Image (cartoon, rainbow, N blue to C red):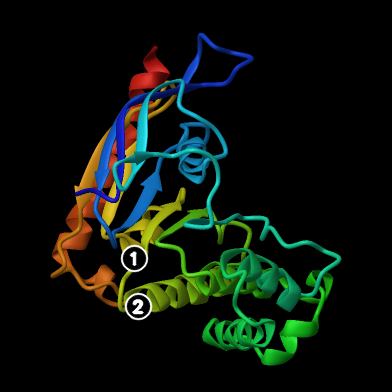
Amino acid sequence: MFKVEAKDLSFAYPDEPDRNVLEDVNLQVGEGEFVCLLGQSGCGKSTFLRLLAGLGKPTQGQLLVDEKPIEGTSLERSVVFQDYGMFPWMTAGENILLAMEQKYPKEPRAALRERALHMLTEVGLDPAVFNKLPKELSGGMKQRCAIARSFAINPPILLMDEPFGALDAVTRARLQDMVLDLWSHEETKKTVFFVTHDVEEALLLATRIVVFGQSPSHIIFNKVIPPTVKHDRDHMYRSEEIIQLRTELVEYINRDVQLHTKE
């Protein structure tokens, strides 16, 4: 059984019903995979993620989780956005607790608070951050809080839409390693969909890489990275398998760009 499955999925916005953003997308993803979605700007990666989040419905075809159609949003599918998604009038801790109270309404608040503090330390933040407002935090700290919130509610599916795109290179690298470490050490791994423009980021994080072509977009590349390929920053620059995969990826993306340039 596949955790997530797209069957002949197409999507067009209501104000442009004759212009598909996504067209005939077919994808099967198993439980616990870390899927990186690559492609040019405007190719529909984030649109596909929004459909997974339940923030829209396919125009045609199906999008299934555990063989059931997605019907609206759910705390079983948590989203980490590039803009952090934190309410500015609430402290970092209150932002995390709000989501946890929705997921675990019968749990004592003290127990939820303890777990929220634990997750803040898990993402490398001082517990004092719990009482700070988002405006008092750096971009990297706010993104750590957003990731802590998603892991705190423990969803089986985690959706990440270019979560590190606005961060500096050093902070970005640290958060990449942190997310990979959190995910890889879970007893039951989450199924992750991670949107990125960065081939290097995809090669570091993914167990499967999916490339969307230009609009109207369909999948032009879909490859599982074997478990024998180590996921660490040093190995990826020495591994012949990774070097070959990087070349293959760039060729697919460039070929798609050239094809649409000629049209």
Can you say which quadrant of the picture contains the C terminus? Answer: top left
**Quarter of image, res 164:** bottom right
Left or right of residue 105, residue 132 in this image: right
221 or 2, which is in the foreground?
2
User: Residue lying furthest front in this view?
Assistant: 106
SS for callout 1: helix
Name which residue type carries label 1: Leu
Q: Which residue is mark 1?
A: 204
Q: Check disc 2 and report the residue beneath it.
A: 186
Taking depth in this image into account, of 256 and 149 the one nearest to the observer is 149
- Residue 115 percent across, percent down from the top left: 57, 84
Q: Residue at x 27, y 38 (%)?
A: 27
Q: Where does the image place residue 36, in percent across and percent down from the top left?
A: 37, 52
Give the spatial CA distance, label 2 vs label 1: 18 Å
Q: Secondary structure at mark 2?
A: loop
Please name the residue shown 31% across and 60% down the image: 206
Sooner in the amino-acid sequence: mark 2 or mark 1: 2
Residue 22 shows in this picture? no
User: Which mark, residue 262?
Assistant: none
Front label number (2 vs 1):
2
In the rendering, at what x and y percent does residue 4 appear? 32, 46
Can the viewer see residue 108 in this picture?
Answer: yes
Q: Going 46% across and 31% down the picture, which residue do you hit?
A: 43
Categorize mark 1 by other alpha carbons within 10 Å: few (<14), some (14-19), many (20+): many
Q: Position of residue 95 (x, y in %)?
A: 72, 69
> Callout 2, which amino acid?
Glu
Residue 24, quarter of picture: top left
In the displayed structure, 250 sits above or below 174; it is above
Quadrant assignment, res 185:
bottom left
Residue drawn 34% across the image and 28% down it: 218
